[in-house]
Amino acid sequence: MRIAIIGAGVAGVCSAYELAAAGHQVTVFERRGSVAAEGSFATGGHIAPALMLPWLAPAFPRPGAGPLGWQWQRWRQQRKPATQEAQDRLLQLARFSFERLQALRRHLQLDHERAEGQLVLLRQDKDQKAIQAGLERLQRLELPHRLLDAAQCLALEPGLNPEIALHGGVQLGVGEVGNTRQFCHLLRSEAQRLGARFRFHTTVRSLEAGAPTRLVHEYTPTDEQLGSSPRRNEPQEAGDTQPAPLGPQEERFDAVLVCAGTGAAPLLKALGLKPRWRELHTLSITAPLRVLEAHPHLGPAAGLLDWQRQIGIARIGQRVRVSSLPRPHALELKASTLAPLHETLNDWFPGAMQAGQVQKWQGSHLVLDDGLPVLGASGQPGIWLNLGQQSLAHSGWTLACGAAAVLAHQISGKTASEVQGSELPDIRGLDITRSA
């Protein structure tokens, strides 16, 4: 089949690899100049099936204005029986996805920045009491975890500030952190080896469902690119960024998979698909770790989540990244906006970051009211959806590999229930029909 993928974030790149590995002719359209250039650029990088469940999020007893208003609505939505059933399927997908990530890493020998371990930090006794029901749910779902006291947390993460108030923590048995963008670049190369083509600086303008599906795209280079041509002998990447004719161009495909994040909404609206989207925004800061011989454990060893503040901390190679959960309003990247991230890092790892080299980032994502992703057929012939993963936890990476494998299986029309020996999870209830 000729298959188009719209969007080259972590969802799109994983989908490109899986579909190319299944023998399809894959073309990826990306409006930016590289993979992982928007919503996947500087995400928290946390990967753990347990983070997909709402047990980590504080309960909101009444509605409020601003960001808490949306969180309260999501909290109510997540307690509906249909949503809880979808969450159970999401957990199955997350478990499968984690296994798929490990399999890809071994099979393709992907060497990217990563560290094993996830620790949820509880500042006060009331924090532990607040998540007790969540811990019981983890137990019922057989998700490995261990409740730790403060001393055990310090032994696990020796760089933690021993002077800050720390009641204890929850060590997740399955979890890691890593460099999402670096992973995307490595997997993109593997997809290209299988024949996938990436068309950067190319914006998809419209879709027309059918057999085949009509896709209109336009080469949208930067002003710099329009005013210059590639230098002689300058390396070019498999035709990805070669100049193309200006103006709308039409192509037809047997299937189109939409992984375009916030760019998906206008395309789907034109098709008559109008789910109750919300646009959420995530903040992160990243900087090199300070290296001091006298303090070899100055920063985090792996991944941590401050439960009370809902802020994640991750070791990314020789850097540290601090990230927020998604919020419903975009914010200016100024000192007051980023202060909670800096304060949280300084609470737990004082002096760990080289503050003069901070990279600031804000990413945007689409999500439905229940906060769950949208995966599967769109209801329109030939058009499939892989959206909303980044609204969960501190990274959509947890689901990306598994969702891509399941969707590649469905798009291919295969009836077998396994991928390389792993049973495929059931993703019914995660499609767009629940927004009707």
Image (cartoon, rainbow, N blue to C red):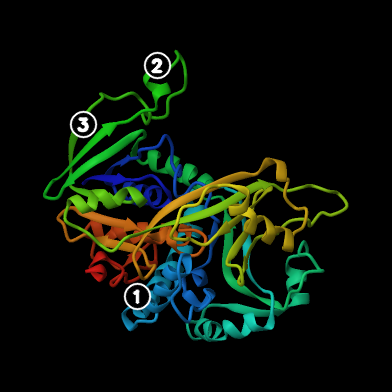
* Mark 1, other Cα within 10 Å: few <14 / some 14–19 / many ≥20: many
* Mark 3, other Cα within 10 Å: few <14 / some 14–19 / many ≥20: some
Q: Secondary structure at mark 2?
A: loop
**Apparent side of residue 36 relative to residue 243 in the rendered image (left or right):** right
> Can I make out residue 314 in this image?
no
Residue that label 1 marks: 86
Residue that label 2 marks: 229
Spot occupied by residue 244 in the image (x, y as percentages of width and height):
29, 25
Q: Residue at x 58, y 45 (%)?
A: 360
Nearer mark to the viewer, of 3 and 2: 3
Q: CA distance from mark 2 to mark 1?
A: 50 Å
Q: Nearer the viewer, residue 335 or 432?
A: 335
Give the mark, 1 or 3, whose residue is nearer the N terminus. 1
Nearer mark to the viewer, of 1 and 3: 3
Q: Nearer the viewer, residue 111 or 347?
A: 347
**Apparent side of residue 45 relative to residue 402 in the rendered image (left or right):** right
Residue that label 3 marks: 248
